[in-house]
Image: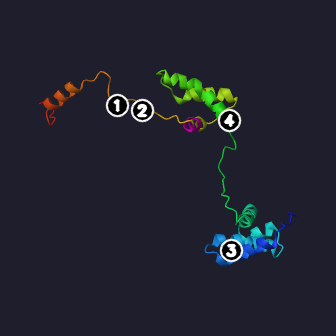
Amino acid sequence: MSRQANIGKEEIERAKQMRDKSKTITQYRKALSVILIGKLGLTADLASEILGASRRTIFRSRGDISKQDDTVSKSWGGRRHSSMTLEEEKEFLKKWEDMATGGGVLTVPPIHAALTERLGYDVPMSTTYRLLARHGWRKIQPDTKHPKSDPALQDEFKKKSPKQWLPPA
């Protein structure tokens, strides 16, 4: 048997006001979830079955109504499953940063191999890309101009070349 929720009279009144003012079905279901549990004494399992929502949604709805006056915003983000702290990540990338500023060309696979060695277990390549993006690393394209090119010779060739190519006769 699931535990019984203790919903106060204030929450029930707020839910009734929300029910009367609701403009969407989501708001209406939120209000009904609190009313069904608080006023009628239904369990969360039964209320979720009646409303066609999960138990967790029922409890979230109650939390939304009870915190209606508060201006606290939801913050579901954050690093819940980080392998290293930000300071450890900076220290890890320091060696690679020194190589990059010294004029070396860096590719992701060696950084990824060093990361998996440091952590002691295999991580997806996307983790390495996210690590680099988190610390402001970006891909730099090579120049599109050859280092030995001569712009004057290229312009002369453009002027003297025929406008239309014809196959040899």
Residue range (magenta): 129-134
Q: Picture quarter containing residue 44?
A: bottom right
Of the 4 image quadrants, the one containing the N terminus is: bottom right
Q: Picture quarter containing residue 74?
A: bottom right
Q: Which residue is mark 2?
A: 141
Disc 3 crowd rating (10 Å Cα; few below 14, some 14-19, many 20+) is some
- Mark before the other along the chain sequence, 3 or 2: 3
Of the 4 image quadrants, the one containing the C terminus is: top left
Q: Which mark is residue 85?
A: 4
Q: Which of label 1 and label 3 is nearer to you?
A: 3
Q: Are marks 2 and 1 in contact (CB under 8 Å)?
A: yes
Q: Which residue is mark 1?
A: 144
Left or right, residue 168 beside residue 39:
left
Q: Say which amino acid is labelled 2.
A: Gln
- Mark before the other along the chain sequence, 4 or 1: 4
Q: Is residue 77 magenta?
A: no
- Write the residue at 50% across / 26% down: 106
Left or right, residue 44 beside residue 91:
right
